[in-house]
Image (tube, rainbow, N blue to C red):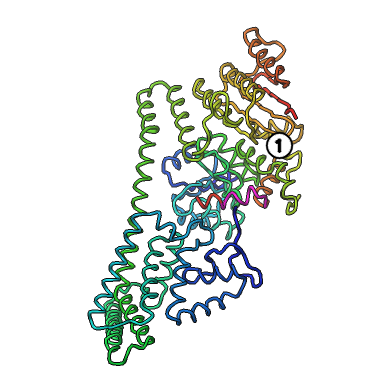
Amino acid sequence: MALKTPPHAVIGTPYRPYRRGVENAIVGGVCGGLAIRLGVNERTVRIVFSLLALVAGLGVLLYMVLWLTRPRSGEDEAIGHRLLGRRRELHRVLIGLIAIVAFLFILLSRGTPNLGVYTWPLLLSVIAAVGVWRGASSDERRHLEDLVKSAPVIGAPIARTRRGLWLRVILGVVLVFIGLRTLNHLRSFGSGTATVFFGIVVLVAGVLVLLAPWWLATLNDLSGERRARVRVEERANVAAHLHDSVLQTLTLIERAAGDETAVTRLARNQERELRQWLFEPDREVPSDEGGTFTSQLHALEGEIENDYGVKVELVVVGDRETDADVLALVAAGREAAINAARWSDATAISIFAEVEPHAVTLFVRDRGKGFDVDAVPHDRQGIALSIRQRMLRHGGTVSIKSSLEVGTEVQLTLPRKL
Amino acid sequence: MTMGQPRVFLVDDHELILSGIRSELAGSVDLVGEADDVDVAIEMILERAPDVVLLDVHMPGGGGLAVLNAVSDKCPTIRFLALSVSDAAEDVISVIRAGARGYVTKNISGPDLLDAIYRVAAGDAVFSPRLAGFVLDAFSLEGVNLEAVDVDPELDQLTPRERQVLRLIARGYSYRDIASELTISTKTVESHVSSVLRKLQLSNRHQLSHWASERHLN
């Protein structure tokens, strides 16, 4: 069932289920979503989480856990769930994890005895963050990329100028240095948790400032590469289709160069086929006895253009499923159209069909030489008769209007049974 | 310059099409210029103020729609006839909603194209059978009952006479054929079609307003 989650918290009105917010998200939408879920002010939730973060980093950990386990509003799957389903992503997260543990070992070997109660929550949060990054949907990934790019210093337009680069390097190195110093001096100051926290934050910020441009650049490269690959595949598909259809037809046209009717027919066929491929890729192909009324008529259009080399202008308004009556109507229309194609000398035939609540109507019109309806030669009466009989058998009516040098129009009407 | 002939400007990014149209129209209209890209087209159209712009729907750089929007803001008297390779009305509906007076397909015969240009120059609308069918579909009676709340009968419904005229267009009748079939004057047929065009451009019917947005997503 589709549940519509409001984009912002409506105070006093809780919504189920809990989804991470999208429009009111600052980072992961965890707080925003929770505010919507509980019907409380977004800011309140954020303050609570910030305070919790000071209690042994619990707020941060809780945030990351919710980020991984709650689906984003509008998505079905939580990031964690998605990760578990993707082996390759999972491996990458594990590699990230190993790298972080290694980093920690280095810190420990530098003589930092204990990072205090913050250690595990922060470590787990960082691992979770890696997981979030790898498992985010492309929509959320874009949000995060924007977030990173708009962050101060880190995302500042990747400095191409020498000055910007220097500033970045100096700032990064200073931050890393301060962080390491803080962590190093813990032994002498005793391990105050606040100091540890400060040290880690400064250290991480320094690393980010140093590496951000490089990281962002690889990010852009990767998504660019993905886009390029999709484009190449799409191009190959189009090329394959064009080769099988248009190129073949062009060869046939070249061979039939002297035969005007053949060339016109080939061109028209190809045009119809290409047009369908371009503009109506999912129109169904009718079977003999099935499909909708419209698909039957499209098949008829193709058949007449193919066999008789005349242009058919088909317009259908409304649609319905076929049954025996409708098939009879199409068959009668087919005979009328063949009649027009054969005898009228017109280069185009108009077929108009309309499905209305009370009736289905089909018009077949040509602007050819026409004939005198009352003085039909015997060889043509047969066809008119067979159209008429077909329609009568299914409770329909036929009316034929024709005048010399103006054209002929056959109207077939099938009342709809209730 | 010949008096009495409409001043026509061509916009198409295919040189073959341009030269084909040019040779078909030569002598029958006053060709005042042509352009093969959106920006050039906008600038030249505003400078030369033609009566009718024959506008290709599909062009790089925003297509015919970009030209239409830019020009009709500054100079609403210039009339547009859309030229499309596709006869799917859905394909040109956004151009018509933006103000074009009709559309023709690129395989149209010379005399028919000329007829359409003169009609547009005179302020009338040009409806192909396909477009007529599309309008009948979009303004179907069944749709109205469902969303009766925000239906403006002036704009969101067709009169029985307009329906009749559209059906005849869809059946392949020319305006003159329609006039004699319904025993009304050709001018009356034209005014019915113009009124349908106005509704097509201004109506807020779901089927119309949602077309454009759905298309742009793809």
Residue at position x 45%, y 68% in the image = A65
Residue at position x 59%, y 54% in the image = A2
Residue B176: x, y in percent? 68, 33
Report the magenta stretch's main SS: helix
**Can you say whether B164 is above or below A263 in the image?**
below
The chain containing the residue under callout 1 comes to B
Q: Is residue B25 visible?
A: no
Verify whether residue B212 appears in magenta.
yes
Residue at position x 31%, y 74% in the image = A159
Residue A222: x, y in percent? 33, 59
> Along the line of sight, which residue is nearer the eye, A311 or A168?
A168
Quadrant housing residue A402: top right
On screen, residue A414 versus residue B84, left or right, reads right
**Can you say whether A54 is above or below A319 in the image?**
below
- Circle 1: is it few (<14), some (14-19), or many (20+) Cα within 10 Å? many
Total marks placed: 1
Where does label 1 land, which residue? Answer: B165
Q: Which residues are magenta?
A: B204-213
On screen, residue B181 versus residue B10, left or right, reads right
- Seen as rendered, the residue at the extreme bottom is A189
> Along the line of sight, which residue is nearer the eye, B140 or A196?
A196
Residue A324: x, y in percent? 65, 22
Q: Helix, strand or loop at disc 1?
A: helix
Quadrant housing residue B128: top right
Please, what is the three-letter code of the amino acid marked with disc 1? Val
Residue A242: x, y in percent? 38, 36
